[in-house]
Amino acid sequence: MTETNKTPTLSFEVFPPNSEVGVDKLTDTLDQLKELHPSFISVTASNHKLNYEKTTIDLAKYVKDALGCNTMVHMPAAYVTKVEVDNVLNRLEKMHINQVLALRGDIVDGYVPETDFKYASDLTSYIKKQKPYFEVSGACYPEVHPDSKNRIDDIKHLKNKVDAGCDQLITQLFYDNDQFYRFQEECAIANINVPILAGIMPIVNRKQALHVIDNCAARLPKKFINILDKYKDNPVSLKEAGIAYAVDQIVDLVTNDVEGVHLYTMNKSDTAKHIFSNTASLFNLKNI
Ligand code: FAD
């Protein structure tokens, strides 16, 4: 078998903290993440109609200005109006940020969005119309978005999103690489040819595992359930096993030529450092 020379990209997701303590911790986290030379750091948006500019955009500005890292801003269609999008795009342009993750946004507690954009594809085409040189990414779901009738519908809508101008896709987290490889094949069949970054969230405690099971529509394979059972009373071993599992997943993905790994950091740098110091040469990371 021939080895390809393509090095996968490495990127991180962080979220705006909601307390002073959180701000201090995140500043440390970002300093540590910067040392891993990510292709970009993405900043999430709240799934409530909260102060988007004061949270997401201000944090993105910090990542760009103080750290000098490429920054991607999450923009949730369900929670922003056209006027807000225009203002934010102009502000991003001044900040030299041109990467946006265009999302519909999580719909919680029966909230019915009164918005100018129904789907992420509507927001994608709007951004591309206003700022054609912005790079727009989109979300995708190897195990199917929970609102979709079936896999075929989900892929058809994804194709529409890419045709609307989406330059790159980032997956929902998953724990079974075979689900990802099947999804890649389905995308290829549907002529979805943009890069697909694999979203990985290491599970390092029981609470997080239960959250994933309840909220993320990601199946935990038997191999992982066994880890949770065996180390249910041993948080240190559970954390180590969760990190080892993520390393194993990443090694397999890179071996199979994944275009990039996007780590959901949960605003913690120690897990990220642990994982990527064990896989540094796979990403061409030096001095770690
Ligand atoms: P869409 O692409 O609009 O799809 C939503 C559903 O509608 C899917 O079932 C799709 O198949 C269907 N659909 C699409 N187009 C049509 C159409 N024309 N007709 C009928 N059905 C259609 N949420 C946040 O609130 N903030 C964040 O920061 C955030 N970050 C995320 C980052 C990543 C990498 C991922 C994977 C998800 C993120 N989410 C975030 C969650 C996301 O907002 C939700 O999963 C949301 O439910 C769907 O968003 P989407 O952009 O995939 O929506």
Image: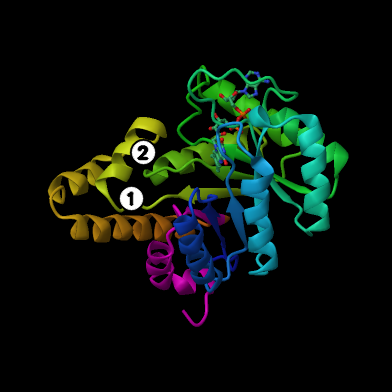
The residue under label 1 is: 203
Q: Are marks 1 and 2 in contact (CB under 8 Å)?
A: yes
* Residue type pointed to by label 1: Ile
Q: Is residue 129 visible?
A: yes
Q: Does residue 284 show up magenta in the picture?
A: yes
**Can you say whether 32 is above or below 231 in the image?**
below
SS for tag 1? loop
The crowd level at tag 1 (other Cα within 10 Å; few <14, some 14-19, many 20+) is many
**Quadrant hosting residue 124:** top right
Left or right, 164 with respect to 129, comes to left
Q: Position of residue 45 (x, y in %)?
A: 59, 42
Q: Does residue 129 show up magenta in the picture?
A: no
Q: Nearer the viewer, residue 35 or 50?
A: 50
Task: Tell me where the magenta segment starts and ends, as one range.
Answer: 260-288
The crowd level at tag 2 (other Cα within 10 Å; few <14, some 14-19, many 20+) is some
* Residue type pointed to by label 2: Val
The residue under label 2 is: 212
Residue at 46% in and 73% down: 280
Q: Position of residue 197 (x, y in %)?
A: 56, 50
Residue at 24% in and 40% down: 222
